Image (spheres, rainbow, N blue to C red):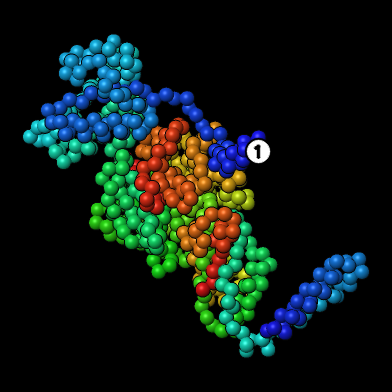
Amino acid sequence: MRRLLLVCCLLLPILSHAAEFEIYQSGYKPLQLALLVKSASANEQALVANVVRNDLDSSQSFKAMNPLSFLDTPEQTWAKVEYDDWRIIGADTLALVDLTDTAAGWHAEVQVHDPFRNKLLSTVRLDAPHDAIRQLAHSISNHIYQSVLGIPGYFNSHVLYVRKHGEYSDLIYMDQDMANQQVVGSNFTLLLSPDWSPDGQVVALNTYVGNRPRLEFFNLRDGSRTAFGNFKGLNSTPEFSPDGRYVAATLSYTGDINIYIYDIKADHWQRITRDTAIDTTPTWSPDGKQIAFVSNRTGDPQIYRMNADGSDVTRVTTIGNYNTSPVWSPLGDRIAFVTKKDWAYALATVRVDGSDIRYLATGQQIESPTWSPNGQMLMYAAGESGIRRVYRIPAWGGTPEAVTPPNIDASDPAWSRH
Amino acid sequence: MNSHRSIKFAVVAMAAAGLLFAGCAKKEVVSEPAAKPTTAPVQKTVSKPSTISVYFAFDKSNLDSASQAVLDAWATWLNSNSTHVTVEGNCDQRGSREYNLALGQRRADSVRDYLVSHGVSASRIDTVSFGEEKPVCTGSGEACWAQNRRADIR
């Protein structure tokens, strides 16, 4: 009995984080995917098959089946699809890819079938230059995803994150599947809240120069840095408007901490909120008409939304006493945020009217959510015992998967808008 | 300085005693000390305060009495010379980093406001927030977090 008690006591701290929140379970079961890639080029055949399998697996909407279970060869299947043979092994989706090397580059023919409906869902022909075979594979993933789910894929998107080492921070770029990692900006003194411009060319960020915070545009093409917010006090949490004309951010030069909007072309700042409490972390609705933000005007941080001119402020979150880091979904219906309960943190989403909170992941430290361009996935940074990693999770519930290695301090993921 | 401080202690002790025996305390005893601030003789020997940090509760930016005592010493020192200072606001690593940047600013601002209310010109005080980005203690646990919820005067 005493031993049992001891075991319970040891387990308690480990379980307690999860115990604070009821993790949302959608009940969705990934679709079993049979993927057949044929090509005269063995290396590229394997590469494309791996990239597509990994893309669709990582969405947690699909589960790629082991080809050893297949009853038919790619050649037989390209000649004639025997739906019975795919139904019997439980394939919900059958995807056929024929990859050929042409003078102009790679050419792929793609067919997507639903064996349980005896139906060819779609066919497409895709081309890519020889040096862009991974992008071609991501386009194939997009096509399969959209054919089956009716939602655009996000597999050609990119992610930025911040790698901190000692006093310095680097800005790292990668494809959404972690390939093609590049240091695009290095040796920033603190680098916070990077946000992609809608055209993917520029990053708005908060850094410190001479121990003073400022807002900068970082040009991804040439690495140039341009300060656009350099006021007394705070210059933080920049986010581009969906049309790319404005940046919403937090300034405090008046003595109060408020939301402002910067008109890029006119080089002009306009104050949007006016109360004396903390107002910070603005995030635009996808139509650009509203802004959600955090305010502690009632005493603790809660999420609010308002029209982009500052009118009609409405409180969104009503449960809990610490709700922060809002990010409006590109679909418009939900806001992702970070919430705290008894020192456990959770990544959650809530409808914009404040209803239907879904707790997706918990931990000691959860921060900086960012949506995939199609609104189906989220990335966020989570710290355990002082090491932060970036994780990815379906917005409809699922399993968090780390996308950065455990040996670097990674934070502030920012998903590209396309 | 020392004699000034001992007078202060005596006054506080008297005030406390007054509260304890509130039934028979006379009002003048409690209100009297406010009438005797003597800074003129102290100014000549003022040295820079050695305590540079004041501490805060989680998600709070208000100054407790211990912090106010530290800042009183700073106000005295700043009022005796023309030095420029920067107040750096910091937070522990729990909670939102973005919100903590704002909270750190709030902490720095409340230190500045206190000093200004004690006669220091606002133009001599800069404020900056590092949020949770510059912890002095990188472990976890309240003992560590408490050290990070601070404002430093430099």
Task: Give the percent coordinates (x, y) of residue A346.
Answer: 52, 41
Among the 4 quarters of the image, the one containing residue A20: top right
Task: Give the percent coordinates (x, y) of residue B103.
Answer: 55, 58
Q: Amino acid at mark 1?
A: Arg
Q: Which residue is mark 1?
A: A2
Q: Between residue A225 and residue B144, name the one nearer to us.
A: B144
Dot 1: chain letter = A
Q: Residue at position x 38%, y 47% from top?
A: A406
Task: Give the percent coordinates (x, y) of residue A296.
Answer: 58, 51
A109 shown above or below A299 = above
The answer to whether any part of residue A288 appears in the image is no
In this view, which residue lies farthest toward the left?
A: A103
In this view, which residue lies farthest toward the right?
A: B24
The answer to whether any part of residue B45 appears in the image is yes
- Name the secondary structure under disc 1: helix
B31 shown above or below A72 = below
Task: Give the percent coordinates (x, y) of residue A201.
Answer: 28, 50
The image quadrant where one finds the C terminus of chain A is: top left
Q: Residue at position x 65%, y 35% from top?
A: A1
